[in-house]
Image: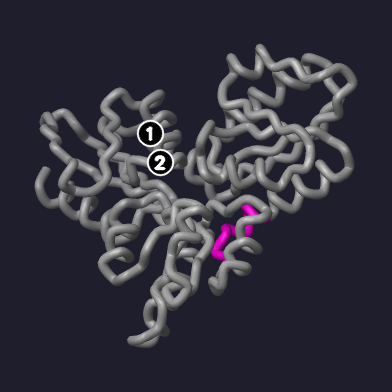
Amino acid sequence: MEVILAEHAGFCFGVQRAVDTVYEQIARRGKDEPPIYTFGSIIHNEEVVNDLQRRGVRILSSLAEAEQIPEEERGTVIIRSHGVERNVSEKLKALGYQVMDATCPFVKRIHDIVEKESAAGKSIVIVGDEGHPEVEATRGWSCTKTYLIGSLEEAEKFVPQAGEELYVVSQTTFNYKKFQDVVEIIEKKGYNVSVVNTVCNATEVRQTEARELASKADVMIVIGGNHSSNTRKLYEICRQECEETYHIRTLDDLHLQLPETVRLVGITAGASTPNNIIEEVRNYVRTNF
């Protein structure tokens, strides 16, 4: 039996940068210095977040929570890789925190685009997942009306105000093909629309590789956090190509019974999955089947 790991699996550039930032601050923190915080979970991976908490890192879930921290405990706050709304960093600084921005540069690019185009009077259309922290952060950089479209059905029902000029962006981890399909539906309606593809290249490459690998595999394993949007989309893509597709968080979740007819097991992982977890799963499958 052959086991193939997708070439691009695990930490992407933005995630690695954010995680490295937190660990570097942990290493530099003096014994009597205030705690280190992240604003929201730094990435969507439970194992990484739990490890950081064991090392003393605290999570701030809102500005209201940040206000409740005693002044002498207001240390460094690291902005999560998904970014935050425009006013959050300034409010944290006003509260006395030292702010370090670990927003993924590709997400920050979307914020800059939204800020510029909304300032020019355009309404912003975000193609993405309702409630995802990146989407909520992006909304917070617009000074005009924002719309959110997360499916082809929502695109079909979408009706802006008469004469409204639209500017379309995407969540960086959205399904690339679905983004193209949503844009096609909107453009066919004849609205005054400009589009920029902001699906991250790392996302696009991972999704393309996952689809190709799953189309050849008898069994497909997708590794990633339960709250990871890009992992969930990898699972959906693989499931379309390979019926025996499994989404696991760690090796503990893997309960495989492989028949002798299985010749190829494919493995891929979300952009916030640590390499040690990927290797643990790959080695287990190689040595036990």
Nearer to us in this view, 78 or 277: 78
Give the residue displayed 66% in from the left and 12% down from the top.
Answer: 157
Against 103, residue 34 (above or below) is: below
Task: Say which amino acid is labelled 2.
Answer: Thr
Against 14, residue 115 (above or below) is: above
SS assignment at label 1: helix
Q: CA distance from mark 1 to mark 2?
A: 6 Å
Percent coordinates x, y for residue 54 in the rendering: 26, 67
Query: Which residue matches tag 2?
Result: 231
Q: Is the image coloured rainbow, by chain, by secondary structure, or in one colour? A: one colour
Percent coordinates x, y for residue 284 in the rendering: 15, 51
Against 261, residue 202 (above or below) is: below
The answer to whether residue 15 is visible is no
Give the residue displayed 28% in from the left and 59% down from the top.
Answer: 50
**Left or right of 163 on screen, residue 269:** left
The answer to whether residue 116 is visible is yes
Task: Say which amino acid is labelled 1.
Answer: Tyr
Quarter placement of the C terminus: top left
Badge 1 vs badge 2, beta-carbon distance below 8 Å: yes
SS assignment at label 2: helix
Percent coordinates x, y for residue 5 in the rendering: 33, 49
Give the residue displayed 62% in from the left and 30% down from the top.
Answer: 179
**Left or right of 56 on screen, residue 120:** right
Give the residue displayed 84% in from the left and 35% down from the top.
Answer: 122
Give, as a single range, the part of the protein colored magenta: 101-108
Query: Which residue matches tag 1?
Result: 235
